[in-house]
Amino acid sequence: MINRRKFIHASVFSSLAGAISQRFTNIPKEALVNQPVVVSTWDVGIEANKGAWEVLRNGGRALDAVEQGVMVTESSRSCCVGLQANPDRDGYVTLDACIMDEAFNCGSVAFLERIKHPISVARRVMEKTPHVMLVGSGARQFAIAEGFPLEEEKLYPEAKKAYENWLKKGIYAPVINIENHDTIGMVAMDAKGNLSGSCTTSGMAFKMRGRVGDSPIIGAGLFVDNEVGACTATGQGEDVIRVAGSHTVVEFMRQGMSPETACKKVIERIARIKKDKAKDIQVAFVALNKRGQAGSFALNKGFSYAIRNNSTEKLITAKSLF
């Protein structure tokens, strides 16, 4: 027979467990803040968010918003993402991208050449194949079959000049916030409270031929759990992969941490792994929880992220460990 004290303890524990389990899954719609909302990496996120906001402000789906948003950056000549970006050390531009919706559907492409919008190819992989990731010539073959035009194989003038300067020494030592400023990640919540995310990149400037970083890897460069939140990463992809960065941020949010605190916890983990080399690289995370609250944290100073909702449109300098 259960005595009164044990019954009370059991009741309290049951109530707490129930409250924790429903913290994110049963949030009433009126409790959501800053909804809809879109958040993206770096200063280029301001323009990318404009593209996403056109979808969100009209009641559109977050998945459509995060695709349309980063397509703005893929088309831009003002940053190092897309076909205008810096090449690998052999002089070729290779692109990676992934996308994920509110139902754990996801698609990815890596080592893709001569296709202007890898994010859209990643979405086609998600929606039209039984796979998550296609790479290299197979990814390009799929893109062409899906009607994506094959662009001319060339380096844009700015990228050609940078590549020629790099060839004079040929040393691979990316400058933080500059030569790894080559990714845009975006997470968004729509008017229905559903989350989606995207990430697209040209990879590290002057990387080894065939190198793939975190950006097209679900759980590293991007992760979405519609009950909890979404996260995307930027910076040195190898170190994001080591800790399954974006997935780990989301899991910390599942434990009740704010987006900023969750990002900071993973950055601290990377710093412990890298030890004295941590100040020589950049890694940053941007996260959005189920309440529509956004946050970020970087390993080193110099990272910023852009946010857009019904009340604000601004660029925010992220806090950093160093």
Image (cartoon, rainbow, N blue to C red):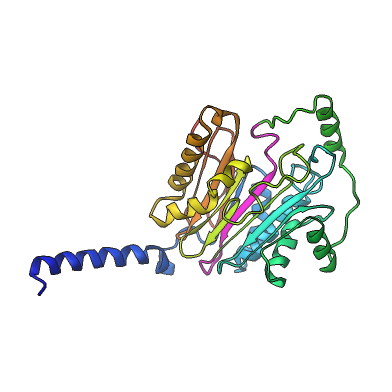
Q: Is 5 rendered above or below residue 43?
A: below
Looking at the picture, tell me which residue is in the foreground, 61 or 24. 24
Q: Image quadrant of residue 146?
A: bottom right
- The prevailing secondary structure element of the residues shown in magenta is loop
The residue under the point 11% across, 72% down is 2
Q: Position of residue 107 (x, y in %)?
A: 67, 63
Q: Is 61 rendered above or below residue 219?
A: below
Q: Which residues are magenta?
A: 176-194
Disc tally is 0
Q: Residue furthest top?
A: 169
Q: Is residue 66 within the magenta segment?
A: no
Residue 320 visible within the image: no
Q: Position of residue 12 (x, y in %)?
A: 20, 64
Judge from the rendering whether residue 251 lies leftward or rightward of residue 221; answer left or right.
left
The residue under the point 74% across, 46% down is 202
Q: Position of residue 242 (x, y in %)?
A: 56, 45
Q: Position of residue 320 (x, y in %)?
A: 50, 35
The residue under the point 36% across, 65% down is 21
The residue under the point 74% across, 62% down is 120
Q: Is residue 184 within the magenta segment?
A: yes
Looking at the rendered image, the quarter that the N terminus falls into is bottom left
Judge from the rendering whether residue 52 lies leftward or rightward of residue 230; answer left or right.
right
Residue 295 visible within the image: yes
